[in-house]
Amino acid sequence: MDNLITFSITVFTAFFAITNPISNMTVFVSLTQGADKKTKNDINKRANLIAFIIVTVFILLGKYIFELFNISIPAFKITGGILIFFIGFEMLQSKQSNVKSLKNVNIDENIAVSPLAIPILAGPGTIVTAMNFVSNAAPLQLFLVIAIFGSMSLLTYFTFKLSDLIVKLVGNNVISVIGKIMGLIIAIIGTGMIIEGIKISFNFIAK
């Protein structure tokens, strides 16, 4: 039971850091600037639902994807760890991808698919993080990862829904600091994945 609680907390922390609802909220505000309340809400719902479906598919089929492309768990953990580390490092440097700095986007529901759902909410970092937790997980752990990402999607939905109010109350400076803290956590998670992958590799060699 204690192991499941620890596992759940670790998964939630990782997803919270990588999806970063507070930081992504400013992206949502920027992309939907000028849209009416109904359009904003429709885009918000669609983006989070699509992101949840994409990540869930990778969680459920990740094992078969590994087998199809003959991907070993150590190689995945090391490569994924490097990718996640650099995402965190860029956040610490206050860098944003070109996708997240888009300003002149037409206000229509297509932005719910791209760039919001992909790659902002369900980008490579999120997918790699999810697949890392289920690469050799038991069925109960797999269900927990899906449930936790579902709760994260709900949290992101409500954060986006209250985005205008939150930005006014908190301010951009505080949101920037939170983004840097999340970047540090992501970089640490990435480093941990690399170390774990190397350890597994040495165990395979020893055998």
Image (tube, helix red, strand yellow):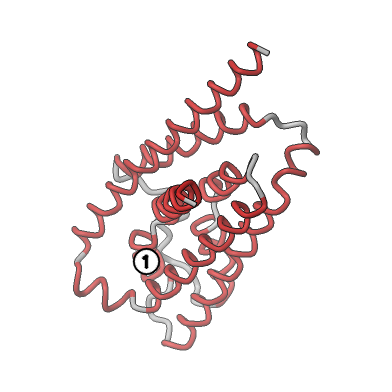
Residue matched to label 1: 25
| Residue placed most toward the observer, 3 or 115 | 3
| Residue 153 x %, y % | 50, 67
Is 166 left or right of 123, judged from the image as shown?
Answer: left
Q: Residues within 10 Å of mark 1 (few under 14, many from 20)?
A: many
Toward the right, the furthest residue is 68
Say which quarter of the image contains residue 157.
bottom left
Report if residue 182 is visible in the image.
yes
Q: Residue at coordinates 43% horizontally, 41% vertically from top-left?
A: 87
Report x, y in % for residue 135. 64, 41
* Residue sticking out furthest to the front: 1
Left or right of 143 on screen, residue 150: left
Residue type pointed to by label 1: Met
For the residue pair 180 and 90, the one nearer the viewer reads as 180
**Quarter in which the C terminus is drawn:** top right
Number of marks present in the image shown: 1
Give the residue displayed 47% in from the left and 54% down from the top.
99
